[in-house]
Image (cartoon, rainbow, N blue to C red):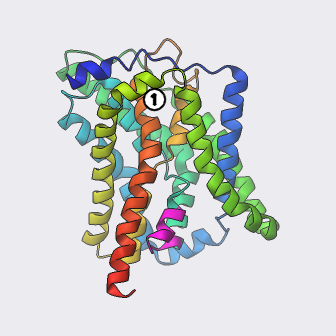
Amino acid sequence: MMYEELLNLDPVKINFDKSGMDMLNIALAVVMYGVALGIKPGTFIKVFRHPKSILVGLIGQWVILPALTFLLILIFHKYITPMVAMGMILVASCPGGNVSNFITSISKGNRELSVSMSAVTTTAAVVTTPTNFAVWGSLYVRYLERHAADALQTLTIPMWDIFVTVFILLGIPLALGILTTHYLPRVANALNKPLQYLSIVVFLLMVVLAFRQNFDLFMQYIKWILLVVFLHNGLILTTGYCLGELCRLPRPDRRAITIEMGIQNSGLGLILLFNPNIFPPELQNGGMLFVTAWWGIWHIISGLTVAAIFRYRSRKRGE
């Protein structure tokens, strides 16, 4: 039943004209510029002086997160459609989300570690996002060819187009933001917090614009998408914390890594999905869109919930 109902999502078409796409691209670029305002040139130096926590976090973000996503897809392959699965892989390939630093602060986690992870994963996303999506997406396509009755729609993964898009949307704004922080620190301080709040508004606006014509359909099938994202995000948050425990990291570092792994830049995922050069209009990828959009809403809810739990524990300990 769940599989058949999720199949109904794939034909959903989200169409943006060139002006609409340009507005979305500019909005995300501005958001990423805001993220970069919190990255000081000395951030990377501080990170590599005490590299254990950042290395654990990056391994979790770049390797364990997509690998666990792939494993979860294989376990539930009878219940989720290929496009929903590809949406999960796309989200897992994105860098950390831009609200993770704010949520880490609420949780009394290591904010400097959070900012460092965001800086490194976002900067490296030009390479890691297309690579992870290509590697794990290709593995999933091969799995379907061998074990599934229903093959995935013809889907090529154009690494170069993804690379160019991510570079324009992330690389350039990040460079400008870091330069602003270095040469115009007062301007950076004045813009930092307003742009953080703007980032949440921009993502919610993107979701509204995408699904305003398909709201009834979204509400009809949200129960299944909610379940998929809940399991996916819950697994990653739990893994992030356990990874920190296993590596015996300080409590604030465990919290930062947990939240960094559980907060993904799904806004970037939506922009990639809306790009006709990457995902052609004839491709029925509604399942990917629904998963990516709901992840961006849910990870704020789950992140704030986890932060509240962490903060409550700190209060009980008298920290």
- In the image, 148: left or right of 67? left
Please tell me whether residue 101 is drawn above or below residue 144 in the rendered image.
below
Examine the image and state in which quarter residue 217 appears.
top left
Image point (53%, 47%), residue name: 125
Examine the image and state in which quarter residue 259 appears.
bottom left
Q: In which quarter of the image is the N terminus?
A: top left
Examine the image and state in which quarter residue 79 appears.
top left
Q: Is residue 307 magenta?
A: no
In the image, the segment drawn in magenta is: 101-111
Q: In which quarter of the image is the C terminus?
A: bottom left
Image point (34%, 17%), residue name: 8
- In the image, 98: left or right of 233? right
Q: Does the magenta stretch include residue 106?
A: yes
Q: What residue type is labelled 1?
A: Leu
Q: Is the magenta stretch mostly helix, strand or loop?
A: helix
Residue 247: x and y in percent read 29, 71
* Whether residue 286 is visible: no
Residue 85: x and y in percent read 32, 31
Considering depth in this image, is 197 or 173 the residue closer to the camera?
197
Q: Which residue is at the far bottom? A: 318
Q: What element carries label 1?
A: helix
Residue 77: x and y in percent read 21, 30
Please tell me whether residue 155 is drawn above or below residue 264 in the rendered image.
above
* Whether residue 193 is visible: yes
Image point (66%, 58%), residue name: 36
Which residue is denoted by mark 1 in the rendering? 289
Image point (31%, 18%), residue name: 7
Q: For mark 1, does the 10 Å Cα neighbourhood hold few (<14), some (14 to 19), or many (20 or more) residues?
A: many
